[in-house]
Image (cartoon, helix red, strand yellow):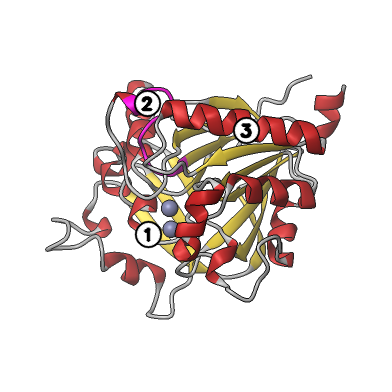
Amino acid sequence: MSSPTHVTFWGVRGSTPCDGHQFDRYGGNTSCVQLTAEGHDPIVFDLGTGLRNYGEQLAREDALEGFHAHVLLTHLHWDHIQGLPFFAPLAAGGGTVEVYGPEQAEGPLGDVFDGVMSPPYFPITYRQMHGTASFQGVSSDDFALNGAKVRTRWVRHTDPTLGFRVEIEGVSVAYLSDHGPGTVPDDPDDYVPPDVLELCDGVDLLIHDAQHTAPEYEMKRDWGHCTIEYAIHVAREAGARELALFHHCPSHGDDRVDEIVRDARDLVARLGGPEVFAAADGMRRPVTSRAAADA
Ligand SMILES: [Zn+2]
Ligand SMILES: [Zn+2]
């Protein structure tokens, strides 16, 4: 029996939005994933440019007024926040978005967010939008949210960055969009920190950074991302059931991503799991529990 809980990938690209025919199939929008479970408001991972298409869909469904979502924001890099001003429930409708993101040493998360969304960088602040956005700084924590169990942990990246685990309606999803071993040079390449294992432990779907091939990683060790092999390693160490390769490098067109998926599937076939696929803009995918999948 399949679960009605599902994810929709609205943006899967890393670093910067991309345009061109070479991105037709996997897409060029930056990080944004919607998690929907029946009877719950949606949970949204990150506010990249993919968020705009999510808002367009809500507008088509006439669902802007009264829209309410919780956002789990990994960090403040541009590719994870640029969709917010263009999200229809906030830009044009009377929606409400509660953002939970990494607490900042410089001050409250909303005030720090103002640093990038205010003149002269953008004509208005989030407080001047039609809808209501609020920001709540969080650290390593476990809390209840809208009928879900949420776990937040710090993960290795270039600036303070959270990874998330959400358990809802009997299924679990972990989201580590920007994550790599190279930013802590003393850590061996295959080391998986306990915090990451706590996020990914036995999860039904792991959405993980997969920005680099191994040769690319050698050139960009300190960029805070990882190889496809490392993403598979994390999934296997944690016993994740299904792995979504995510945060595709802007230099990887569709054909390159196809090759990466082929190589990844060859590797997991030799290792004995997990299932692996590449996330793509617009992809909607059910999240099923292990028990349901085995039935
Ligand atoms: Zn990113
Ligand atoms: Zn980043």
Say which label, 1 or 2, has the lower sequence index: 2
- Label 1 CB less than 8 angstroms from ligand 2: yes
51 and 279: which one is in front? 279
Task: Mark 1 vs mark 2: give the one in front.
Answer: 1
Looking at the picture, how far across and down is residue 133, in whole percent? 36, 54
Which quadrant: the N terminus? Answer: top right
Residue beneath the point at 46% across and 41% down: 248
Which quadrant: the C terminus? Answer: top right
Q: Please, what is the three-letter code of the amino acid marked with disc 1?
A: His
Which region of the structure is painted magenta?
Answer: 22-32
Task: Mark 1 vs mark 3: give the one in front.
Answer: 3
Residue beneath the point at 55% across and 65% down: 182
Residue assigned mark 2: 57
Q: Please, what is the three-letter code of the amino acid marked with disc 3?
A: Asp
Residue 263 is tagged as 3
The answer to whether 103 is drawn above or below residue 229 in the figure is: below
Q: How crowded is mark 3: few (under 14 residues within 10 Å), some or many (20 or more)?
A: some
The answer to whether 70 is drawn above or below residue 289 in the figure is: below
Q: Quadrant of ligand 2?
A: bottom left
- CB contact under 8 Å: marks 1 and 2: no
Q: Please, what is the three-letter code of the amino acid marked with disc 2?
A: Gln
Residue beneath the point at 71% across and 50% down: 233
48 and 141: which one is in front? 48
Viewed as shown, does residue 289 lie left or right of 22? right
The answer to whether 102 is drawn above or below residue 278 in the figure is: below
Residue beneath the point at 27% across and 28% down: 20
